[in-house]
Amino acid sequence: MQEIERELIIRAGQGDMRAFREIYQRASGYVYTLAYRVVNKKHDAEEVTQDVFLKIHHSLSSFKFEASFKTWLYRIAVNTALNHAKKRSRVTTREVEEVFEDPATVTQPDAGKRLEAGETEHQLKILLDQLNPDQRACIVLREIEGLDYQGIATSLGININTVRSRLKRARETLMVLGKKEVASHGM
């Protein structure tokens, strides 16, 4: 995500819609990617992104610059995505998303690479879906986003020991699932 200048944040907080639009343009991809990694569905990630920017729009005037804007945005995005994921997990019906592209749109030289990348993404998505939303958020923030334990604790507003225990449980679950996957393929 591009760094967002203090003046732009202040102007947006004072109601300047051009400034807010600029913040949205710079940060929406970042928020969407983060949300997608937590909720694992495109439609849900789009909803979360909209919710995040609504929250930011309503509370930007009270932003105190005690933390960086990126940290503040990160925390809002992760918490919104977690709440959305928890709400969705209560729903009994599940949507099925198409993971692979239409074969007609894949060019010959890239076909193997794209199918392999799609399969890897699909497998990662299946594994992450097995974790509860709190564990998934910690794993995403640590292993995909590269945050340290303190950064995760700050972003989620939880104790660092809670981060450690969630990561430990998530890794244990993923290891068990990985062993089952290997066994089911006769390796």
Image (cartoon, rainbow, N blue to C red):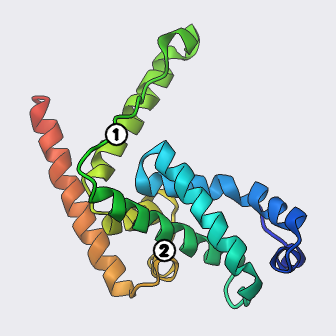
Label disc, if present, on residue 148 of the rendered structure: 2
* Residue 20 pos. (x, y %): 81, 66
Q: Amino acid at mark 2?
A: Asp
Q: In the drawing, does residue 119 fall left or right of residue 91?
A: right
Camera sees residue 1: no
For marks 2 and 1, give the one nearer the viewer.
1
Q: Amino acid at mark 1?
A: Glu
Q: Nearer the viewer, residue 110 or 24?
A: 24
* Residue 117 pos. (x, y %): 45, 31
Distance of mark 2 from mark 1, alpha carbons? 33 Å
Residue at 16 percent across and 37 percent down: it is 182
Q: Quadrant of residue 125?
A: top left
Q: What secondary structure is found at the residue carrying circle 2?
A: loop
Q: Quadrant of the C terminus?
A: top left
Q: What secondary structure is found at the residue carrying circle 1?
A: loop
Q: Nearer the viewer, residue 91 or 187?
A: 91
Residue beneath label 1, please?
95
